[in-house]
Amino acid sequence: MSKDYKRSFKVYSAWNYQKEVEDLNKASEEGWQLVKGGCFHSKFEKNPSVRYRYQLDFGKIDNMARYLETYREQGWEYINSTFNGWHYFRKIYDPSLPEEEYEIFTDRESLHEMNSRWARPALALGIILGMFAILSGIQTIRQPNLPRLVQTLMYVVESAVLIRGGLLMSRPGTSRSRRGDGALLAAFFIVLIAGLAAFFYFSDRRPYMETEQSAASIDQPIENSDWNDFTVQYTDNYYLDLVLESEEPMTFAILDDQGTPVYQKTEKSFDEEGIRVRLEKGHYSLFMSAETGFHVSCRIE
Amino acid sequence: MKRSEPMSESYYYILLCLAKGANHGYGIMQMTEKLSQGDVKIGSGTMYGATSNMMKKGWIREIISDEPGVERRRQYQLTEEGRLALRTEIERLKRMLENAEEV
């Protein structure tokens, strides 16, 4: 006789794990018994002849044999553990026994300890990401561009979800089930994946150029010369570091593919970093014109 | 003397159950229920956490019994430090009770 199985891809937030326990108990009542619990994917077996009560524990276990024995001696059957430290247990349900028989944390201190094992690292990570968000935000305000903006938004969302989750988890006794929780959890993963993808996509497609030109004296002048070119793959703010030195005023320019300058500077001596230049998608070349000895160094990112 | 931290109910009963000799987790749980007349229960998660923490503090130690035919081989035993901690807690509880009677 072949067994009937089903899979579930329902994801629960850590601070809402009691909801998962409730759902597992309900599924058991309907004849579906959990055989493998997971963060993203669980497996059930059809067996209407038994009814189980489930419990979840979280944390790194220093002595697995002792741990399992402590559960086994009170009638708990170990199902499995997830990669990130959740442990699934079940016990055959006997309606004549009091509800406390199905509790694994029977005092506030130990429940708080378990919750803190999740909440503390989540809060620490949330605070670190929050600091990254602030630094990235400052940088974005000073030199806005697309990858920085994506990075800042990503840090803000991830740190907010982690800090909120950590606070909910570390407050024992409060009802953690809130509406919009599933949407927030989905947002966490979507922002993480889409944010990283967008960040690498945009970072990878930025031009980076560092170049220098010089002529020592008036004997070797360079006039009206194009000396380097680059391609911009998407419209954004780009930043120019520029140094000009010459005896007479010289001209430096960035020309678009029509030969129109999008940036131009005529100076004898000039040194500035992070000059914001808005560049459309397209092809550009560097142009300079000098009548005497000069030195130019420029960097665009 | 340094004022000692109040002990959690579970810690207190576990130490109390071990005062007269070594016992295994299930035995501690049953004895606790009997002593407290069903008031105090020690679930598996609480039991594992409490025994882990008390072993780290050096209050109890694990002993593996080699008696043949004994189903549960893992037992816990009170250490001298554990006995002292229990005695201190009992003194604290006595003082609290006396205070209540004075008022």
Image: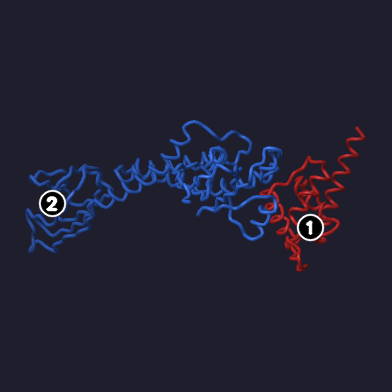
Chain colours: A blue, B red
User: How many numbered marks, from 0 up?
Assistant: 2
Whole-percent x and y of residue B39?
Answer: 78, 40
Q: Is residue A205 visible?
A: yes
Q: Residues within 10 Å of mark 1 (few under 14, many from 20)?
A: many
Whole-percent x and y of residue B60?
Answer: 76, 59
Q: Is residue B33 left or right of residue A81?
A: right
The residue under label 1 is: B23
Q: Is residue A69 left or right of residue A122?
A: right
Circle 2 sits in a helix, a strand or a loop, which is it? strand
In the rendered image of this protein, does residue B22 appear above or below residue A264? Answer: below
Q: Which amino acid, mark 2? A: Ser
Q: Provide the chain ID for the residue under circle 1.
A: B
Q: Which amino acid, mark 1? A: Asn
Whole-percent x and y of residue B94?
Answer: 88, 44
Q: Which of the 4 image quarters holds residue A276?
A: top left
The residue under label 2 is: A285
Q: Residues within 10 Å of mark 2 (few under 14, many from 20)?
A: some
Circle 1 sits in a helix, a strand or a loop, which is it? loop
Q: Provide the chain ID for the residue under circle 2.
A: A
Pick the residue in front: A131 or A204. A204
